[in-house]
Structures are given as structure tokens and as C-alpha cells.
Image (cartoon, grey):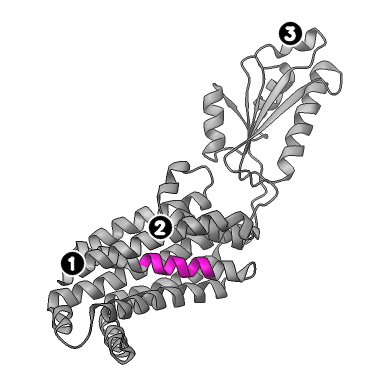
Amino acid sequence: MNFRIIKALLRKDFSLFLQNRFYMLMTIVGLVFYIIIFFIMPNKVDEQLKAGIYAPVMPPAFSVLVADPANSLSNYDSLEDAKTAVENGDTQAVIALPEDIMQVWASGGKPEIDIYYSSSAPLELRDAIISLVKELSYIQTGQSITFDTNEQVMGQDMLGEQIPMRNRMVPLLAIFILMMEILSLASLIAEENEQGTARALLVTPMSVPELFAAKGIIGVGMALGQVVLFMLLVGGFSSQPLITLSVLILGSLMVTGLGFLLASLTKSLMSVTAWGMLLFIILAIPGMGIMFPGLISSWAKVIPSYYLTDTVNRVVNYGADLSVVGGNLLILLGFTAVIVAAGIVVLRRRYQ
């Protein structure tokens, strides 16, 4: 492999990128825009508590509390509606009273009260809800400790690990930066295909591996350089920097492979933009699930970007080590290897 040829190709590709004013402007403006978004987002957790209650038979003491407009306690008609509200983030906790609660109290027993928590509920909520139920039960029966509770967290349990919204946005913004390079690289290759530059280069002493090496270096270099700069500015390397850098390298390789695939399956710059935006939306779905817990379910794990965003989230926001995210890295490595190999094979056929 002739590194002088690769160096010349890199200069050519970088020059073409600078000439493509649209993607160059989108790259620069996008990076600045994401950094501004991070710093203008709230850096504190909203401590306002929202709770609800489901009661087939409402005890008088509880009904007084629900009826008071000063309290933010919602009343749900069914247990399914109550659980859905918790999963969707409409309320942070729901108290579910049993249908025979009055009879159990009258017989001197302890009813079982179910409490459902949102995965984004703050740590103090658990004690607050238990204290609320305890106080209302005392008002109703005149006795303390007249109930047992079954507590369940809806979604991934992050109780005690609440972080500001802007910190939850870091994985999503990082994948946005990486995905922009899919469009940039694909448009660069598509432009060469339209102009016949790639075929002309292949009749020179340059070999196909040298061509792909240059494309890979420019793709990975531009993607990795931007996302590393972003993570440095927002403090993304404050915890486990080697793991963070490793997953960003894998992400840069993955988007480079996706750029190869997109360029090989499209015939013009317009089709690159159209199909690229669809790919952009699909890959952004896991990041939205991190910003809004409970928004998506486990089906999102079939999207390769899930393992990128989930790893960045766990490492940057929760300080997870290799024992926690090692599985994600292996799966992401597998996805990346398959995508890069497929991209090279398909794009090579396009050149031939």
C-alpha cells in the first residue's frame, strides 16, 4: 500500500469537502449549535413531584386529598391507565389501593398497597410516598403501620441517579454529530461517482485498498475529531475517558461504514440527502429513549446506535466501568465490523 497515494487522496477529498459548502456549513453550524444547546439547557433536576392514585373504593381520607385542588394528585379510573401514565412520564408515582381495603382495615388486617414508580423519579419520592400513605392510613384508621407495600419501578431503575436534562442530551447530541458525517462522506463519494472521478482514479497506479483506506481515514477522522471536541467541551471525558474514547472510535467506524453503504445504494446527491435523513431519524431513536425514559421499549436494541448511545450515557452520566458496558462494546464492535465490511463490498462493486 502506497502511503503517498493515500496522502494525495486525503488532500483531494478534504478539498472536495471544503468545496461542498452545504455539508461543510452544516457540519460547522451543527457542531456549534449542539454545544450551545447543551449549555443553555437546565443543569439542575426538576424536583417537582407528580403522583397519582388508583382506588376502586376510595377511602374518605384519600378522597379528601384527591379533591383538594392544591394537591397534584391525579385520580385514575383503571390500573392500566395508571401504569401507562407512569411509563409515559406523565406522573412519577402511582398509589394503587386494593378493592377490599376498607374491609381489611375493618377486620384489623393490613392491606397490600402497590406503588409504581417512574424510572426517572427522584430518590426522595419513595420516602415521600410511603410517608403520605402512612399519614392517610393513620387518619383513616387511627392506627399506625396499618398497611404493607409492594413497590415496583416502571422501566430501568435509575432511582438515586438523577441527572439534569442537558446531561441526558449528551449521547443524543454525540450521535447527531456522528450521523452528520454519514451524509458528508456519502455525498463526497456520490459526487465522485457522478463526475466519474472514482473510475478515473482506478485506472491510475492507485489500488482499490488505497482508495478505501483514504475514504475510511477521512470519514473516521472527521467524525471522531468533531465528536471528541464536543465531548471535551461538555465534560464527556470526566469519567472513564478510555472507554468513552473507545466507543466513540467504534461509532466513527460505524458511521463511516454506513456512509459507504448509503453512497453505494444511491445515485445522486439528492437521493443521498433523502435516504440519509431517514437513516438519521432511525439512528436517533435510542438517544430519544435516553432523554425520555420509558418512551421506547426493548425493540430499540435492534438499532446499532442503541449500543453507542447507551454506553455513552452509562459511562458519562453514571460512571459505569467496563464490567457494566463491556457487553455493549462487544455488540457494537460486531455491528461495526458487519457494517464496514458490507459497505466496502457493496461500494467496491459499484466502482467495478
In the image shown, does 120 or 10 lie closer to the viewer?
A: 10
Residue 36 drawn at (x, y percent):
50, 70
Q: Which mark is residue 335?
A: 2
Residue 105 drawn at (x, y percent):
78, 12
* Residue at the outermost right position: 143
Q: Secondary structure at mark 2?
A: helix
The residue lying at 17 percent from left, 81 percent from top is 202
Query: Could you tell me how far apart the alpha carbons at marks 3 and 1 are, in whole angstroms?
Result: 76 Å
Tell me which label, 2 or 1, sits earlier in the chain.
Answer: 2
Residue carrying label 1: 349
Q: Quadrant of residue 76?
A: top right
Residue 13 drawn at (x, y percent):
28, 83
Q: Quadrant of residue 318?
A: bottom right
- Dot 3, how many residues are within 10 Å of its Cα: few (below 14), some (14-19), or many (20+)? few
| Residue 42 showing in the rendered view | no
Residue carrying label 3: 103
Query: Could you tell me how far apart the alpha carbons at marks 2 and 3 are, in whole angstroms?
Result: 57 Å
Q: Is 251 a magenta residue?
A: yes
| Residue 55 showing in the rendered view | yes
Left or right, 115 with reference to 170 = right
